[in-house]
């Protein structure tokens, strides 16, 4: 069972907006920055956002991220078929003294 | 071109050991803290361990603490994961990843997660 809670799945039609949430506690999300990763099973995960909302170069601006208290969010606007993947949040947990991932959200483009 | 290449995976019997390597090219690994993350079928991403840029700080997931050891040889631009007392539940695709480049100057850079990832190496533990 993951320390960070994510909705297992999200879906939308092309062009729509989907939002993924990541819920934690004051000892992880509440006190450390959150990253978001895009992952296709068997392939290397890709960093989408670091430092809560910093988008690395090459990540389309259709993607946005935010954080409030102990909840982080990832939004995908103008959904495209290539956005189908698993999305994970991650952060450091001060009580576990380790990095924790969310349970992952599978995004499906209908 | 920045690249991380993992190697050392394979099929091993329960209770045996295996050493994974993570070799870097296109970057000086000694500046970076490096994480190990694994992906077991149907189980999502699981963080395994991290070694700080200077090797002084090492942290482990509860599931591997006492059995796995992370180390680094900066002369070879390589980080290692020594895995001992392997169990079937350790079977997974193992990735290494550096912290994001912006975190390099932070003394606790490891808390900033993963930036550049390798392609992974597969470990299978079975009788």
Image: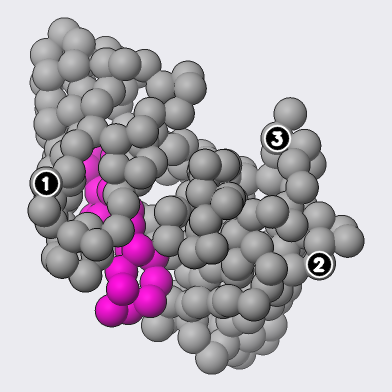
Q: Is residue A41 left or right of residue A22?
A: right
Residue at mark 2: B73
Q: CA distance from mark 2 to mark 3?
A: 18 Å
Residue range (magenta): A87-108
Kindly identify which chain the residue marked by label 2 belongs to: B
Task: Find numbered disc 2 in the image and state the secondary structure of the residue it sits on.
Answer: strand
| Residue at 36% over, 33% down | A54
Residue placed under numbered mark 3 in the picture: B2
- Quadrant of the drawing holding the N terminus of chain A: bottom left
Q: Does residue A103 belong to the magenta stretch?
A: yes
Chain letter for mark 3, please: B
The numbered mark, 2 or 3, whose residue comes first in the sequence reads: 3
Residue B86 % position (x, y): 57, 83
Q: For residue B66, what is the image quadrant? A: bottom right
Q: In this rendering, does residue A78 appear at all?
A: yes
Protein chain holding label 1: A
Residue A70 as seen in the image, left or right of residue B127:
left
| Kind of element beneath mark 3 | loop
Point out residue B69 in the picture as x, y percentages from the top left corner.
Answer: 63, 80
Q: Which residue is mark 1?
A: A68
Query: Measured along the vertical axis of the image, is residue A20 above or below residue A63?
Result: below
In this view of the protein, which residue sits in the foreground, A108 or A76?
A: A76
Residue B55 magenta: no
Q: Height in image: B56 above or below B40?
A: below
Q: Which of the 4 image quarters holds residue B1? A: top right
Foreground pick, B11 / B25: B25
């Amino acid at each position: 069972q993951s320390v960070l809670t994510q909705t297992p799945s999200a879906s939308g039609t092309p062009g729509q907006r989907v939002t993924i949430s990541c819920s934690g506690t004051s000892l992880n999300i509440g006190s450390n920055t959150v990253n978001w990763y895009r992952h296709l099973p068997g392939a290397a995960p890709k960093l989408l956002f670091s430092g809560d909302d910093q988008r690395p170069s090459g990540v389309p601006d259709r993607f946005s991220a935010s954080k409030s208290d102990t909840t982080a969010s990832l939004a995908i606007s103008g959904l495209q078929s290539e956005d189908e993947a698993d999305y994970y949040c991650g952060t450091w947990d001060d009580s576990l003294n380790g990095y924790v991932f969310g349970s992952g959200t599978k995004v499906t483009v209908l | 071109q920045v690249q991380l290449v993992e190697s050392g995976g394979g099929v091993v019997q329960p209770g045996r050991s295996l050493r994974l390597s993570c070799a870097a090219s296109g970057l000086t690994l000694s500046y970076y803290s490096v994480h190990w993350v694994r992906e077991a079928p149907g189980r999502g991403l699981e963080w395994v361990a991290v070694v700080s840029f200077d090797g002084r700080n090492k942290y482990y997931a509860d599931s591997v603490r006492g059995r796995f050891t992370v180390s680094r040889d900066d002369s070879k631009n390589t980080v290692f994961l020594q895995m001992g007392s392997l169990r079937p539940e350790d079977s997974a695709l193992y990735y290494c990843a550096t912290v994001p480049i912006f975190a390099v100057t932070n003394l606790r850079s490891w808390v900033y997660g993963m930036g550049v990832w390798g392609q992974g190496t597969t470990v299978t533990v079975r009788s």
